[in-house]
Amino acid sequence: VIAQVRQPTRVGVLGASGATGRVAATELAKLPEIELLLGGRDRARLRSATDGRLRRRETRLVDVDDDASLQRFCAECEVVVNCAGPSAAIRDRVARVAVAAGSHYVDPGGDEEVVAELTESWREPAEAGLACVFSAGWIPGLSGILARYVDGLAREQMDEVGAVELYCGDSNVWSDTGFEDALSLFSRYPGPLHYEGGRPVHRRLGRAGTLRRVALPAPVGTRVAVSWFLSELRALARASDGAVRSYVVPLGSPATAAAMGLGVALVERAPRAAARLLRKATALDARRHEALGFLAASAQPADVASPERLTVVVVERRHYWITGLVCALAVETLLGGRLSTPTGCHYLCDAVDPVEFMGELAARGVHMHATGVSEADRSGGERVLALA
Ligand SMILES: NC(=O)c1ccc[n+]([C@@H]2O[C@H](COP(=O)([O-])OP(=O)(O)OC[C@H]3O[C@@H](n4cnc5c(N)ncnc54)[C@H](OP(=O)(O)O)[C@@H]3O)[C@@H](O)[C@H]2O)c1
């Protein structure tokens, strides 16, 4: 049972002057009965970020590295939304202080290694009747929800689901904080992995299936995909009889790929310099081609000879908007008592109803479309499907 909340509910957005924090705060301000506390290290940056336009909001000076100010901030909030970063540096610091102060916690990111550990073994939030939700953003976040959504649709429509695959790519110019987190994650990646029949299968890069050419729906087209297991898919993969695989699809130029390689080598010693290098290369790409973010999840039946396929694609060109929107919707779901696992520490995709969440996003203007081939229309090829 979710801890009793007072009215109006005080929601604190930490890092509210940042790119994700601004969108999350703007979306949260649309909710009735919410009072926003905008937290950051610089009052002028906080004011200019939100331009004084948000209803019922106050600012608070808070530095994540200063225990006293962080504790004061968390103690004032029913929910702490941590949009400060980088996650690789903050680790579980804010989550632990928030839970100790009796607040729910929502994070659009979270260091993957730390989150994997917390979701497996951190019991305090459940014992305190609190929800602690990580990976409540775009990738990870909506990526995991889409995979669960397609898995659910396929189970209704196919005799037996053989595999669920997720593809994701994004060529947007993220903040130094965002690129630092991405590079830090890449630098620690233990190598390609997927799940088969609920068990992990490790492969070396270049071995069968770890690099593949895929034809994805427009505007993505035919691309090379690199096997990359998103940790948020682990619970889905463990519970599945079939295979669960995920891939990243690099969308940048060869120069950006080189900057990425150099960034990965540099990130541990000089994280900001590594992030700037990658940001500059990505910004050059964005001048030549319109940036794009996409997710595509696909299911196929266990009978490999069957032509049946189900694919749902989300294409986003509004960049940070989708990350902040998913984060704000996670808070709204929590406060509405609609988390499917209302307490404890979870990835967002394991804590919400995917059909309901995708429906809410569609109602807010997120574009998604589904295509499929069923046994019945074998000769007719792909057709557009109605989404649940
Ligand atoms: N899942 C996804 O798809 C996704 C996408 C993008 C980002 N993210 C994650 O979201 C988080 C924010 O990224 P972003 O791109 O929005 O970063 P950003 O624009 O650089 O914003 C970072 C914010 O953190 C604040 N901050 C930094 N150090 C702080 C400290 N010691 N105490 C208090 N505040 C501090 C900064 O505020 P001041 O400097 O003004 O104090 C700033 O407002 C990161 O963890 C990132 O990995 C996730």
Image: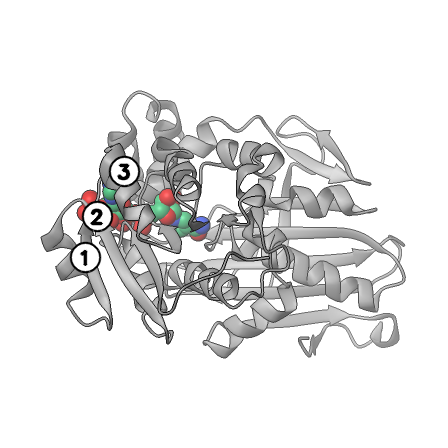
Q: Which badge, 1 or 2, is on the more N-terminal residue?
A: 2
* Residue placed under numbered mark 2 in the picture: 40
Mark 1 vs mark 2: give the one in front: 1
Ligand 1 neighbours mark 2 (CB distance < 8 Å): yes
Q: Secondary structure at mark 1?
A: strand
Q: Mark 2 and mark 3 in contact (Cβ < 8 Å)?
A: no
Q: Residue at x 42, y 39 (%)?
A: 100
| Mark 1 and mark 2 residues within 8 Å of each other at the beta carbon | yes
Pinpoint residue 343: horizontal percent, then vertical percent. Answer: 58, 51
The residue nearer to you, when weighing 62 against 1, is 1
Tell me the quadrant of the picture where the N terminus can be found: bottom right
**Three-letter amino acid code at disc 1?**
Thr
Front in this rendered view, residue 41 or 361: 41
Ligand 1 has an atom within 8 Å of the beta carbon of the residue at disc 3: yes
What kind of residue is marked 3?
Val
Above or below, comparing residue 301 to residue 86 in the picture: below
Residue at position x 34%, y 36% from top?
Answer: 180
Q: Residue 239: percent from the left, percent from the top?
A: 77, 46
Which residue is found at the position 34% from the left and 49% from the top?
A: 83
> How far, Cα to Cα, is label 1 from label 3?
15 Å
The answer for how far apart the CA atoms under marks 1 and 2 are is 8 Å
At numbered mark 3, what does the secondary structure look like: helix, strand or loop?
A: loop
- Is residue 131 at all visible to an observer of this figure? yes
- In this figure, which residue is indicated by the disc labeled 3? 64
Give the x, y percent position of residue 330. Answer: 48, 60
Question: Nearest the camera: 298 or 120?
Answer: 120
Among numbered discs 1 and 3, the one appearing first in the sequence: 1
In this rendered view, identify the residue nearer to me: 254 or 281: 281
**Horizontal side of residue 382 vs 111, given as left or right:** right
Residue under label 1, please give it.
59
What is the three-letter code of the residue carrying label 2? Gly
